[in-house]
């Protein structure tokens, strides 16, 4: 498949499909989309190896794309149960590099009639980068340029549409804590682009001491996968507020607090960049298999 450039290096492609046979869905389909969809659209990238792990590789590995689960039309609710022939659904795949976006664009332009998910054929009805609210294209540079041109943000409002969880200190944490959310995004940006947006020590202190969880409306949900495993994540919305000063950090590490104060406007803008990046990268663990689908709202 051609590696022709698309003009963007961030893309979220929405795919509307229709069941080709009667089927029953009992498990979350994120892993099926991960295994089958990317295999269907790409050969290994020349000079870069696979764009997806082998089946026996861990799915927490940071990869240059994300996927969704299989969802009900007009909703982000996973499909579950018996489906008749012709039942409709949608899914989403994203690219975080120009090469992956080019391969997704090639698939959009010349798609097969069917894709196979967990041995079930699904007819492709439509494919679009523009399907709102989950389809979009941009570039890393555009996200940064836009943030610099806008007023310094005071709040960020995120929607976590699929179960989201984090790994911290050897435990899974299905909670929308600011440092977990924004460090996840910052780590993914640095891993994929090869360039951190801010010094790690400075950024970690900013996310822990200067971003507050103002309010949230979230609930936990279970993701069941085919091998009998399960993951617990949260879904819902959260509002994060920036705090100009933190007296606790000023007492504990006055030099670090001074450094944050000097860079405060830009640190808020970096958080804004990452909030927009979430539309493509997702948040937390296992975004390659349908978890952590997130977008900025409001």
Image: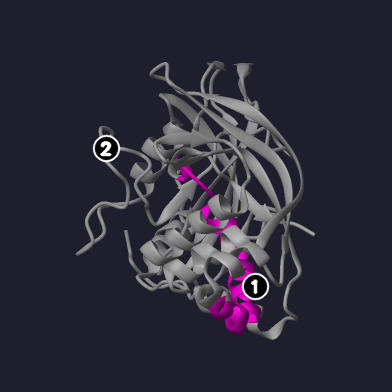
Main secondary structure found in the magenta portion: helix
Which of 284/117 is in front? 284
Which residue is drawn at the image coordinates 43% and 73% (left, top)? Answer: 199
Farthest residue in the left direction?
Answer: 47
Magenta highlight on residue 175: no
Residue 203, percent across and down? 51, 67
Question: How many numbered marks does the figure carry?
Answer: 2
Which residue is drawn at the image coordinates 64% and 73% (left, top)? Answer: 268
User: Viewer-nearest of labels 1 and 2?
Assistant: 1
Which residue is drawn at the image coordinates 56% and 54% (left, top)? Answer: 179
Report the coloring of the rendering. one colour
Indicate the secondary structure of the residue bearing disc 2: loop
What residue sits right under mark 2 in the picture? 57
Farthest residue in the front direction?
Answer: 251
Question: Which of the labelled discs sits on residue 103, or is there none?
Answer: none
Residue 195, percent across and down? 38, 73
Which of 6/144 is in front? 144
Which of 276/133 is in front? 276
* Chain part drawn in magenta: 258-287
Image-quadrant location for residue 145: bottom right
- Quarter the C terminus occupies: bottom right
Task: Identify whether 151 is placed above or below 183.
Answer: below
Is residue 137 in view from this perspective? no
Indicate the secondary structure of the residue bearing disc 1: helix
Task: Identify whether 194 is placed above or below 262.
Answer: above
What residue sits right under mark 1 in the picture? 268
Residue 51, percent across and down? 31, 52
- Quarter the N terminus occupies: bottom left
């Amino acid at each position: 498949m051609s590696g022709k450039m698309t003009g963007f290096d961030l893309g979220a492609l929405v795919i509307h499909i229709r069941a080709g046979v009667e089927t029953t869905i009992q498990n979350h389909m994120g892993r099926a989309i991960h295994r089958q969809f990317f295999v269907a659209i790409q050969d290994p990238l020349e000079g870069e190896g696979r764009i997806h792990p082998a089946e026996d590789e861990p799915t927490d590995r940071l990869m240059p794309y994300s996927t969704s689960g299989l969802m009900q039309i007009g909703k982000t609710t996973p499909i579950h149960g018996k489906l008749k022939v012709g039942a409709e659904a949608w899914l989403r795949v994203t690219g975080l590099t120009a090469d992956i976006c080019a391969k997704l664009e090639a698939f959009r332009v010349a798609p097969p009639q069917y894709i196979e998910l967990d041995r079930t054929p699904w007819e492709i009805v439509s494919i679009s980068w523009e399907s709102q609210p989950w389809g979009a294209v941009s570039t890393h540079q555009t996200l940064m340029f836009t943030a610099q041109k806008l007023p310094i943000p005071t709040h960020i409002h995120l929607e976590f549409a699929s179960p989201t969880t984090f790994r911290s200190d050897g435990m899974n944490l299905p909670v929308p804590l600011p440092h977990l959310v924004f460090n996840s995004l910052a780590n993914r940006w640095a891993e994929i682009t090869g360039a951190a947006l801010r010094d790690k020590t400075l950024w970690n202190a900013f996310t822990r001491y200067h971003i507050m969880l103002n309010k949230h409306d979230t609930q936990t949900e279970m993701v069941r996968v085919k091998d009998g495993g399960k993951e617990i994540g949260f879904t819902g919305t959260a509002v994060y507020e920036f705090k100009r000063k933190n007296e606790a950090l000023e007492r504990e590490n006055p030099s670090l607090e001074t450094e944050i104060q000097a860079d405060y406007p830009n640190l808020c803008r970096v958080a804004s960049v990452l909030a927009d990046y979430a539309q493509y990268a997702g948040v937390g663990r296992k975004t390659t298999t349908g978890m952590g689908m997130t977008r900025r709202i409001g």
